[in-house]
Amino acid sequence: APQPENGGREVRTRHRKLTKMQQNVLGQVISVIPATIEKLENYEQANRLESHIFQMRQGGLISDQQYQSYLKDIKQKINENGWEQSTS
């Protein structure tokens, strides 16, 4: 996963206030992440999901703790299935 240059500290300061609708949509997106991780079929999908989750964290939409937790689940899924990083 891409690492922020400064450890990602400046992320905290930029919490945008979300509208009710945005909060609902965000809640739905977050609620399906675990199921989405379960359904991953290959390394590319896992990698893409990891990128989306990283961007959500960068945008202050999920906490570092949530991010780490999802990341751990994705890595576990990759290991369980023996998916290797495609060397392109």
Image (cartoon, helix red, strand yellow):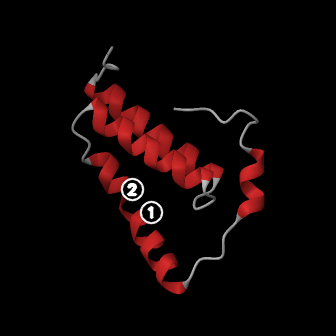
**Cβ atoms at labels 2 and 1 below 8 Å apart:** yes
- Where's residue 40, x and y in %? 26, 42
Query: Which residue does the numbered mark 1 point to in the structure image?
Result: 30
Which amino acid type corresponds to the residue marked 2 in the rendered image?
Ile
Q: Residue at x 30, y 30 (%)?
A: 43
Under circle 2, the secondary element is helix
Q: Residue at x 24, y 47 (%)?
A: 39
- Where's residue 50, x and y in %? 44, 41
Closer to us: 25 or 14 = 14
Mark 1, other Cα within 10 Å: few <14 / some 14–19 / many ≥20: some
Mark 2, other Cα within 10 Å: few <14 / some 14–19 / many ≥20: some
Which residue ends up furthest to the left in the rendered image? 41
Which residue ends up furthest to the bottom in the rendered image? 20
Under circle 1, the secondary element is helix
Q: Residue at x 77, y 46 (%)?
A: 9
Closer to us: 82 or 59 = 59
Task: Tell me: residue 47, above or below residue 61.
Answer: above
- Where's residue 63, x and y in %? 63, 56
Disc tally is 2
Q: Quadrant of residue 47?
A: top left
Task: Tell me: residue 67, above or below residue 79.
Answer: below
Which amino acid type corresponds to the residue marked 1 in the rendered image?
Ile
Closer to us: 67 or 17 = 17
Give the distance between the C-alpha atoms of the residues marked 2 and 1, in whole angstroms: 5 Å
Task: Tell me: residue 9, above or below residue 83.
Answer: below
The circle drawn on residue 74 is: none
Q: Quadrant of residue 59?
A: bottom right
Closer to us: 43 or 59 = 59
For the C terminus, the quadrant is top left
Query: Which residue does the numbered mark 2 point to in the structure image?
Result: 33
